[in-house]
Image: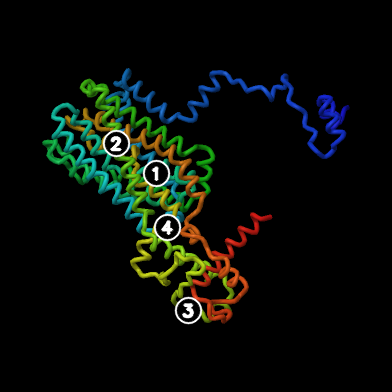
Amino acid sequence: MEDETGLLYRNTTTSERTNILSNPGSQPLIPPRSHHDPSSQPSTRSWRTQAWDIWMKNWFLLGLVIAIILARYYPDWGRTGGPLRPEYTAKYGITSCIFLLSGLSLKTSDLLTSAMNYKAHLLVQVTSFVLIPVVVKAITVAMSAGGGGKMNRALLAGMAITSATPTTISSNVVMTANSLGNESLALFNAAMGNLLGVFISPLIVLLLLQGTPESPEGKHGMNYSKILRDLGTTILFPILFGQIYLYYFPRSVQWMKSKVHFPTLNSACLLILVWTVFCDAFHNHVFDEVRPLEIIVIGIIEGAVFWGATFFLGIVARIRPRKIRILKIMDEQERSLNRQCEPSLLENQSTTSTVDTSVYPCTRDLHLPRSGIQSWCEPMSKPDTVAILFCGATKSVAMGIPMIKILYSSGPESSLAGLLATPLLIYHVEQLFFGAGMVSWLNKWVSRGDETLASFGPASHTHGEALLNGNGVDDGSKNKWSSTDRINYGATSASVASSTTNGH
């Protein structure tokens, strides 16, 4: 049997052998790939394998298309009053299953950890429940007044309902984690938004559609307590039950997760709800009056709303004056050095910052501690900003479809459910595609880290070396550093360490 070295040597050309013998350590004995080597040829896969890969990567979006096609050609099976009785099985059974899975998946400890970040919660929920509905209401009013009867009013009402729904749960958390964002913050805001949405979303729908033919109030009056009871029974109670079960029987939940993929089951239940909605729509011929141009217009408007809300959230979360940003960095370094420095260095520290501009000129005239307003107005971290971006502008199909089914499950308005759900489905597809495109960019953005004092200008190495040598501040006294000196010491030492590493 020929050994590995001999085999590698035999597979080389004459010139390569000469080079290897004359320079034994110059290059490894790696044979060139043969044209007949299967590993060198591009792998050929059957069309069935490629089709399966495409299905597994995009099965939910393709499932939406299949569900709509099935509803188009077989509407009687999933319509209200049909053989499957979806007004009961889908409204209560499937919807409860969706939120029971959410309750079993949410970690209470992670939610409590992020519960104190009230500024992020306020920004997300106000954008979701106030800003977006107000903007969409203004757009629909302008289109109704300017477009006359050219635009289907039910589609405009569907846009209003879409704006009233809370943020999603599963896709927000997954995309936030993939972007290196604060996953627990996204989880808490998604859960809180959906719990608030049980009570707030129907009220927003009533306010936005008040006085219109598409209002669920109609001419009969609406039993608001019944709506809340239905939403609480199908959404709130399953979530609470799932949380309690998860708390007392975590091993049982882990076993269930090992046998059943919760997100896949959740999405499959959602597809069933979508199918029943469109079965009612096609059975009642509600799409006969919709033109393709109207669908395109709705998609363009909702895309603009999504990106407008996303840029607004990014600006509010991150854009701050230079002074506020520098003070935040100084305060963070001060806290870090207080934990790291020896007690002897901190015994005689100054309680206020005596700024030495010879190290970082950007700190001129800036002092610690910060005022309350300066602390409150500090920019949010990059991971928190990522969670805010994914939670603030997205809308939940899992909440919106059941709400439409409940609000329009009976009476003459039931035939509108399909049309009213169309803008929500369009928005959902758009936010999935937009979010997937944002993940890669946000991942790189977070990986670069937050700003440092060096981001605002170069440091003076002369004074930095003096600090490293223990010469203290300008008066020459050792171990008597102001808070700014210790901040500059940490920043300068990190810079020197980085330069030393790069030099070697």
What colour scheme governs how the chains and residues are painted in the rendered image of this protein? rainbow
Name the residue beneath numbered marker 4. 112
Q: Are marks 4 and 3 in contact (CB under 8 Å)?
A: no
Q: Are marks 3 and 2 in contact (CB under 8 Å)?
A: no
Mark 3 to mark 2: distance in Å?
55 Å
The amino acid beneath tag 3 is: Ser
The residue under the point 23% across, 31% down is 155
Rendering quarter of residue 282:
top left
Q: In the rendered image of this protein, does residue 197 appear above or below residue 67?
A: below
The residue under the point 41% across, 39% down is 435
Observer-side mark, 4 or 3, equals 3
| x, y percent for residue 225 | 21, 46
* Front residue of 94 and 291: 291
Specify the quadrant that holds the N terminus: top right
Please tell me which of labels 3 and 2 falls first in the chain. 2
Numbered disc 4: secondary structure: helix
Please tell me which of labels 1 and 2 falls first in the chain. 1
Mark identifier at residue 302:
2
Q: Is residue 375 left or right of residue 212?
A: right
